[in-house]
Image: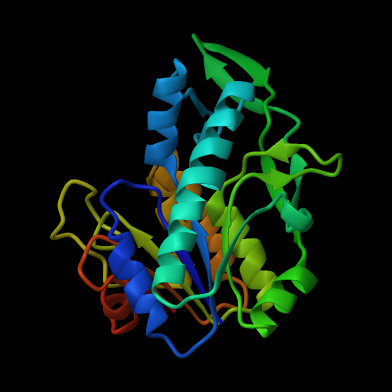
Amino acid sequence: MLIVKIGGGEALNLDGIVTDLAALDRPFLIVHGANALRDHVARRMGFTKQVLTSASGYQSVFSDDHALDAILMAYSGLRNKRLVELCQRNGINAVGLTGLDGRLIEGERNRGIRVVENGRKMLKRDFSGKPKTVNEALLRMLLDNGYTPVLTIPIVDADGIAINSENDDIVWRLQQALDAETVLQLIEAQGFLEDAGDPESLVRELMRAELGEREASVDGRMKRKMHALGKLAHGTVREIIIADGRVEHPVADALAGSGTWIR
């Protein structure tokens, strides 16, 4: 089983990704983002996203009612259905779903995010949370009958309320549930870069034991990503690949050895 996580940047080659996936002879599912599209939708709605930095240094998007509406339109709507359409055009019988549908991904809403603003510590609560369980029976039913799930946020809490969540955490839960051997993450970079501003600083291989140290050395969104990678790498996954989603053959190149590999 292969889990393909497609980032939400504008430069990703979705056509190339789906064309490569159509040529695979192994089962897979897709988890996708849409952050660039969400920001565009939010601006059209008349507001801009608010990024919170927790007291421990992790960044997340503040998910109030307006932000959740933008997520539903961008992630669950336009990006999800256009990606499903692209799959269907390439012979992949895709089914687009959010964590809400069939309680596919159920999570626990955050009690609050401890942030520091203007030198003061405070607690902010929004519609965000962490995934806890996966409706494995629903996913197995789809996969066993030849359907390819195309998954995105929001997820659902115990009260049936839509909540935002991190795709990296969702991928971790999916890998646990399905015991996927390979997780492929397609991003707008050659892979994990030693220096984010230097495309020549690609790290070809990371050891699982390095991830905690790497997490401590970065901040912002990358800090959260490294934390999620650490959880994923210390499970049953055989290999994690972080590769360039902008090239002509993103999936084929990654599986052939490009990008950063965590074994």
In the image, residue 207 sits, relative to residue 244, either above or below, namely below
Determine which quarter of the picture holds residue 54.
Answer: top right
Identify the residue at horizontal 72%, vertical 53% (top origin): 101
Could one spot residue 244 in this view of the protein? no
Relative image position of residue 38 (x, y in whole percent): 45, 35
Relative image position of residue 127 (x, y in whole percent): 68, 31
Relative image position of residue 24 (x, y in whole percent): 41, 86
In the image, residue 179 sits, relative to residue 65, either above or below, namely below
In the visual, does 14 lie left or right of 169? left
Nearer the observer, 33 or 193: 33
In the visual, does 136 lie left or right of 181? right
Identify the residue at horizontal 30%, vertical 64% (top origin): 15
Relative image position of residue 136 (x, y in whole percent): 76, 70
In the visual, does 38 lie left or right of 132? left
In the image, residue 92 sits, relative to residue 222, either above or below, namely below
Identify the residue at horizontal 24%, vertical 48% (top origin): 196
Could one spot residue 57 in this view of the protein? yes
In the image, residue 160 sits, relative to residue 89, either above or below, namely above
Image quarter of the N terminus: bottom right
Give the image's coloring scheme: rainbow
Determine which quarter of the picture holds residue 177.
Answer: bottom right
Image quarter of the C terminus: bottom left
Identify the residue at horizontal 47%, vertical 71% (top origin): 208
